[in-house]
Image (spheres, rainbow, N blue to C red):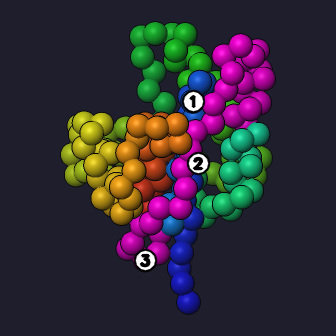
Amino acid sequence: MSNKEIILGIDPGLVKTGWGVVVKDGSDVGYVNCGVIRTNANNLMEMRLCCIFDEISLLLDEYKPYAVAMEEVFVNSNYKSSEKLIMARTAAFLSIAKRGYTVNQYKPNEIKKNITGLGHASKEQIYTMVRKILGTDFSPDNRSHTYDSFDALAIAISRSFCG
């Protein structure tokens, strides 16, 4: 009998929301899929938030994860940027809650430490370890494997390590 657990990681943003799906099988973690939800900057805010909500709902329906994880919000001095991030996270949270899931939240330094062993690891160190852990050779440099999707994979992997 297998104890495989599907974990969905989400890196929310108003322009691009990264998502990554991993499978945990015992102590092994494997790659399933990743991508980016893109919203149209020409659309009204409410339409962009609906897009995030709907696309995350589709991911939850497709992968039926055991767990969902998201990075805790980082509020910076740019109020407008923080507000947009919080709104995108709220759309994601509502979609997740509507499907009956709870969100496992992790601080950015906690994710870095879980992935690399260092709480202040560089982005490149994180991406190198994500590739190594998942046994993949793709890089966050094209349309489907962006930095946002790699961040989401790191969040999902972090959840797999934390149990």
* Label ID, residue 16: 1
Q: Tag 1's secondary structure?
A: strand
Q: Are marks 3 and 2 in contact (CB under 8 Å)?
A: no
Tag 2: residue type? Val
Tag 1: residue type? Lys
Q: Earlier in the sequence, mark 3 or mark 2?
A: 3
Tag 3: residue type? Gly
- Badge 2 local density, few (<14 within 10 Å), some, or many (20+)? some
Residue 16's quadrant in the figure? top right
Residue 136 position (above or below residue 89) = below
Q: Are marks 2 and 1 in contact (CB under 8 Å)?
A: no
* Label ID, residue 103: 2
Image x and y of residue 9, in percent: 53, 49
Residue 119 position (above or below residue 133) = above
**Is residue 76 visible in this depiction of the protein?**
yes
Numbered disc in front, either 3 or 1: 1
Image x and y of residue 42, in percent: 71, 13
Q: CA distance from mark 2 to mark 1?
A: 19 Å
Tell me the residue at 38%/59% (across/down).
136
**Is residue 89 visible in this depiction of the protein?**
no
Tell me the residue at 75%/16% (across/down).
43
Q: Earlier in the sequence, mark 3 or mark 1?
A: 1
Q: Which residue is mark 3?
A: 26
